[in-house]
Image (cartoon, rainbow, N blue to C red):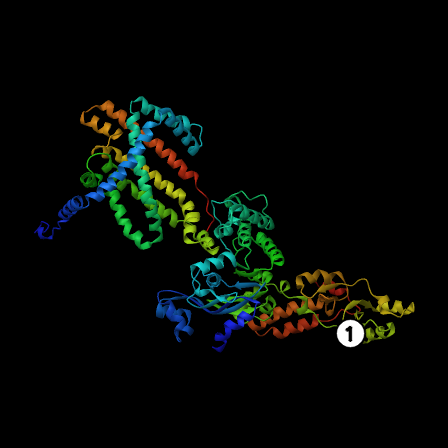
Amino acid sequence: MAEEQNGRTNLDADHSVCVEVRHLWKVFGARAHEIARDPELRHASKEEILKQTGCVVGLRDVSFEVRRGEFFVLMGLSGSGKSTLIRCIIRLADPTAGSVIVNGEDITGFDDARLAELRRHTTGMVFQHFGLLPHRSVLDNVAYGLKVRGVPVEERHDRARVYIEKVGLKGWENYLPAALSGGMQQRVGIARALTGDPEILLLDEPFSGLDPLIRRQMQDELLDLQAELRKTLLFVTHDLHEALKVGDRIAIMRDGEIIQIGTPEEVITNPSDSYVRQFVQDASPTKVLTARTVMEQPPILLYSWQGPKAALQTLRDANVDSAFVVTRRARLLGMVTVEGLVRLIRKRGTSLKDALDPDFVTCGADSVVEDLIPLVASTRYPVAVIDDEDRFLGEVYVGTIIASMIQERGEDEEQGTGEDAATVSEEAAAVDARPTDNSGTGEGALP
Amino acid sequence: MSEFPSFLRIPVGDWIDSLVSWIVANLGSVLDVIGDALLAVLVAMERLLLWIPWFVVVGAVAFVAWYAIRKWWAAPVMAVFLLIIGMFGYWDLAMMTLALIFAAVILSLAIGIPTGIFMAQSDRFASLLRPILDGMQTMPSFVYLIPALMFFGLGKVPAVFATIIYAVPPVIRLTNVGIRGVSQSVIEAAQAFGATSKQILFEVQLPLAFPSIMVGINQTTMMALAMVVIASMIGARGLGMEVLLSINRIEVGRGFEAGLSIVLLAILIDRITHAFASRQQYSQPGG
């Protein structure tokens, strides 16, 4: 309780939180207000509440925070309350209890004027069914938010044109929405939401009505826009793949409650209960796991100041045929192989820098496994994982990738049957052999 | 025993009688004000239509017909209809009838559209109003012709009054239906961008309900036209009066000419307003 009282002041100090939802309830029915207050009903099941009071619980004690500039996804099946929740954030639906704090102000107490102000200047929303004005042109639709604000027609059309171009609809300004395909209509919806230059963008299943190909394209475009504009995004979807692809963090909802919040990787690697796990089973780990998660530490690392003979001896002792060379500050210089070192010694060279192998591949720490596969396949040596400043983090090779995928499966199955787990880990261990002298063979094992 | 018990009789008729006499006795000045207002609109309308030269009217109708219907035959056919009425010798009477219809329709819309909007916004008002509208449409019009006569005396004013009562329900109903039929997703989107309920009404609901409202206007106009003959019984001059006179005098030919003129006028008004209604259809996105 103490935390609740201090919450306001803490929040004011913390400018990184943009939207905060605290203990939010939405109950439909005549006796809605009793439920959140009643200590017994609060914890009763949905069915029990319906039986006792005739009320339907839409949201039950939901709390979460969205940081400024974050891409936050609310995911759940239909009826999980995700659309109600996003509507509560700008009071298109009025919460029954709890608070919604936007930029430090509790909007549940706002009167109509302040609410209109919030909706006009702070937020923009994109809808599943587009919600375009069918009797207005694309240009007028995109400029609609500005019209509501009372911006003069010239100015609002100028600003609308900028965003129409941004979403790739230049040339369609004067068409009616009905002349556009679904994907294009949703671009109009996105442009309309962006034209008011809101801080917060709310997207309620924006791509659910589109066919898969267009959906993927729109997701990519949204990510590009987000990279450019850096809004705070709340995105509702029922599609886990979509959530994993676009979200910085994902909140998974069921029956009006949030049952897990985490990054895509956390959700995939550590599903909080069987409901989330069921969702996750459908998702392919290759699209989610990153190099940072699957990478391993190499048995040896060479340092740039080491002599070639010592280096060769280290490689032979460790029974490997290549190693990465780093500087004193762990900056990756390159890779040397046994052959390279032997050649260097014959030429009486002294610096490892002269033996660096050109066949040397790196990847960023955040690349997903799906993108690593072609890299790994392109070389017979491990791929180095580096961070933004070229520091060496670890290595990835065919075995690590396969092992990571099998482990994912294995964990799922372990929870399911509990029997095959042992064999699966053995399998994983068997594959988890480093490519040594007989490297190259690993490539054939790729799916 | 087989007869309905007489003690159960409710003297509603007596109550209505005393109500009407009370209104006539006590609200005379109010009725006069209303009557004068109706008359002012009507006379202005009639003067305007009779002042405009006939060829200008024909030309204007032809242009409006072409603009609304957008078919090559629309302008000539509609112009010929008007010319036929003129050739029957009924130009002035037709203009008087049109003036009566226009006045009644304008007043019906002024009453009906706001009422329909209010009906769409309040379920309680809608359920209250619906039986009243049913009554207005099904009650034989002679029934309220008599009190209209008592309130406003003989002539055009009671005719307009009775016509409004008869013609206003469709525009109320269709305004209500049109506004209620506006896709919730569009309204929600407007709300999400901070539109006030007034902005939503004028920029979203009314424009999208417009096709439906136009159908209401079309029906209201047609019903007003149907009242013309009946209204002539209380002394409204026009084509209806001609029909009535020829019935009384058993002049079949004259009655046919007047009747045909009414039919031509009806077709003309119907096609033009109908075309306006159907031209404004927007395909609404799903949801």
In the displayed structure image, the side of residue B16 where residue A223 appears, left or right: right
Position in image of residue B5 (x %, y %): 9, 51
Q: Residue at x 18, y 25 (%)?
A: B249
Instruction: Say which element carries label 1.
Output: loop
* Outermost residue to the bottom: A2
Q: Examine the rendered structure and indicate whether residue A10 appears above or below residue A231.
A: below
Residue A374 shows up from this direction: yes
Position in image of residue A442 (x %, y %): 74, 65
Position in image of residue A380 (x %, y %): 77, 64
Name the residue tied to disc 1: A300
Q: Return the residue nearer the eye: A280 or B126.
A: B126
Residue type pointed to by label 1: Ile
Q: Residue at x 80, y 72 (%)?
A: A302
Q: Return the residue nearer the eye: A180 or B39.
A: B39
Residue A403 shows up from this direction: no
- On-image quarter of the C terminus of chain A: bottom right
Q: Chain of mark 1?
A: A
In the displayed structure image, the side of residue A344 where residue A88 appears, left or right: left
Q: Return the residue nearer the eye: A324 or B18.
A: B18
Q: Examine the rendered structure and indicate whether residue B188 appears above or below residue A67.
A: above
* Outermost residue to the left: B1
Position in image of residue A151 (x %, y %): 51, 50
Task: State how many labels appear.
Answer: 1
Q: Residues within 10 Å of mark 1 (few under 14, many from 20)?
A: some
In the displayed structure image, the side of residue A190 where residue B262 appears, left or right: left
In the displayed structure image, the side of residue B122 where residue A330 appears, left or right: right
